Amino acid sequence: PNTKDEFLKRLSRDTRHKLLKSERQLIRNYNPTFIQIKTQEQLQHALKSMFYLNEKRWQLKSSKGSFFNDKIKMFHSEITKSFLDNGWLKWEYFDIDGQMVAYCYDFCYKDKVFGYSTSFDPDVKYKKYSIGKVVQFKSILLSISKGFKEYDFLRGTSKYKYQFGKKEKQLVTIFIGNGLFNSRLYLVWKSISDLLVKVIRIIVPKKIRTLIGEKYFRK
C-alpha cells in the first residue's frame, strides 16, 4: 500500500479496531516514545535491551530464545553496526521511562523491508495493550511513509503475521549432495519431510496452523 489509509483497509475490521484502540489506550496511560535508531550509541543501548527483553520473555516459556549465547549476540552486534553504517538497518522501539518495552528489528534494502525480529516486555501491566503488535503497526506505517513498497515477514507462521499480511510466499531451498550414501539418504529424507509439510499445509486450515504454531509448519 502507498498510504496509511490503504494499509488500514487491508486489515480485517476486528484487527484494525483492536490496533487503533490499543494504540490510543497505550498513549493515554503510558505515552511511550517511538524511537528510530539512527546512531551507533542508540544501537548499543537497543542491543542490550533487546537481549534482555528476549531472555525475559522466553524464560517464562522455558525456552532459550533467539539470542541465547555470546556468539549469537556478538554476530548481531557486528552485523547491525555494519548495516546501520550502510543504511540497511531499520529498527524502531517503544521507550517508557528510559526502558525499551517493545521493538521491531528489521533490515531494509532498496524498496523492501525484511521483518527479522520483534518482541516485547511480558510484564502483565502491558499485556492488555498488545504492545508488540502496536509497535509493529507503527513500524509498518513508518515504512509506508518512507516509500517502501513491501514488508516481508520472512519465514514462520506466527499469528500476528497473518493479521498484518495477507499474502504467503513459498520459500525454496536448494540442497546439493556429494554423491555418498549419507548424502543421498539425507536428501531422500529431506524430500519426504518437505512433501509432508506441503501436504499438511494444504489439508490443515490456516487458523489451526497458526494456533498450533510455526514450529510444526515451517516452509
Image (cartoon, helix red, strand yellow):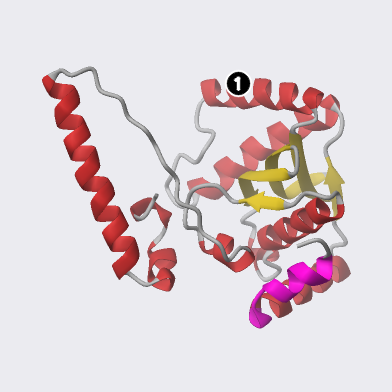
Asked where in the image residue 98 lies, by quadrant, the reply is top right
Q: Position of residue 80 (x, y in %)?
A: 70, 27
Q: Is residue 195 above or below residue 89?
A: below
Q: Is residue 71 above or below residue 96?
A: above
Amino acid beneath label 1 = Met
**Mark 1: which secondary structure?**
helix
Quadrant in which the N terminus appears: bottom right
| Left or right for 167, reference 137 | left
Residue name at image x 63 percent, y 48 percent: 118
Residue name at image x 78 percent, y 45 percent: 92
Q: Position of residue 156 (x, y in %)?
A: 47, 51
Residue name at image x 61 percent, y 56 percent: 122
* Residue 97 visible to the viewer: no
| Left or right for 202, reference 52 | left
Q: Position of residue 160 (x, y in %)?
A: 58, 62
| Left or right for 112, reference 37 | left
Residue name at image x 21 percent, y 33 percent: 187
> Is 125 one of the magenta-colored residues?
no
Q: Circle 1 is placed at which residue position?
A: 74
Residues drawn in magenta: 4-14
Name the main secondary structure of what is drawn in magenta.
helix
> Count of labels shown?
1
Q: Residue 176 or 8: which is nearer the viewer?
A: 176
Q: Is residue 30 above or below residue 45?
A: below
